Amino acid sequence: MHNNPETFGEILKSARQNAGITIEALADKVGITERYLYRLENEGKIPKYAVLYKLIRSLAISADDFFYPERPAKASEIEEVGRMLCECDQRSMAIVKATIKAAIESQSADYQKS
């Protein structure tokens, strides 16, 4: 997710934007004010544990994104997909499996053509 170590606020803002969530929507989901979320993202404010926990869960990101931002992005992406899968119901899981299977088959077909 991040190539270089960043501040907590930059990481939070990037995660929120990557998730396509507005400040208003995330603040509402986490149960904080928009102003407080703005201060977290832009003014160097650090949240209490309860707020950090809700932010991590709401954005479906790893706590490692905050504490080890220098980690390779691919590992974070795989972990993020794993957490998202945990939220899927049976129907959604079937769709995800079929999509992954089709992507792998397509990849294999492309490889065989070369």
Image (spheres, rainbow, N blue to C red):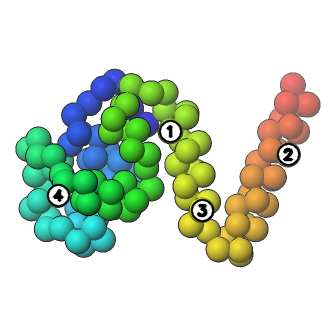
Q: Quadrant of residue 21?
A: bottom left
What kind of residue is marked 1?
Ser
Q: Secondary structure at mark 4?
A: helix
Viewed as shown, does residue 5 lie left or right of 91? left
Q: Secondary structure at mark 2?
A: helix
Q: Quadrant of the C terminus?
A: top right
Per the image, the residue denoted by label 3 is 86
Say if residue 58 shows up in the picture.
yes
In front of the other: label 3 or label 1? 3
In front of the other: label 2 or label 3? 3
Q: Quadrant of residue 36?
A: bottom left
Q: Quadrant of the N terminus?
A: top left
* Marks 1 and 4, how far apart at CA: 23 Å
In front of the other: label 2 or label 1? 1
What kind of residue is marked 3?
Cys
Residue at 55% x, 33% y is 74
Q: Would you call the spot at circle 2 few (<14 residues within 10 Å), some (14-19), or many (20 or more)? A: few
Per the image, the residue denoted by label 4 is 37
* Marks 2 and 4, how far apart at CA: 43 Å
Tell me which label, 3 or 1, sits earlier in the chain: 1
Per the image, the residue denoted by label 1 is 76
Per the image, the residue denoted by label 2 is 105
Tell me which label, 1 or 4, sits earlier in the chain: 4
Q: Quadrant of residue 63?
A: top left
Residue at 76% x, 59% y is 97
Q: Would you call the spot at circle 1 few (<14 residues within 10 Å), some (14-19), or many (20 or more)? A: some
Q: Identify which residue, 65 or 1, lies in the foreground.
A: 65
Dot 3 and dot 1 residues touching (CB under 8 Å): no
- Residue 108 position, x and y percent, is 86, 37
Tell me which label, 2 or 3, sits earlier in the chain: 3
What kind of residue is marked 4?
Leu
Q: Would you call the spot at circle 4 few (<14 residues within 10 Å), some (14-19), or many (20 or more)? A: many
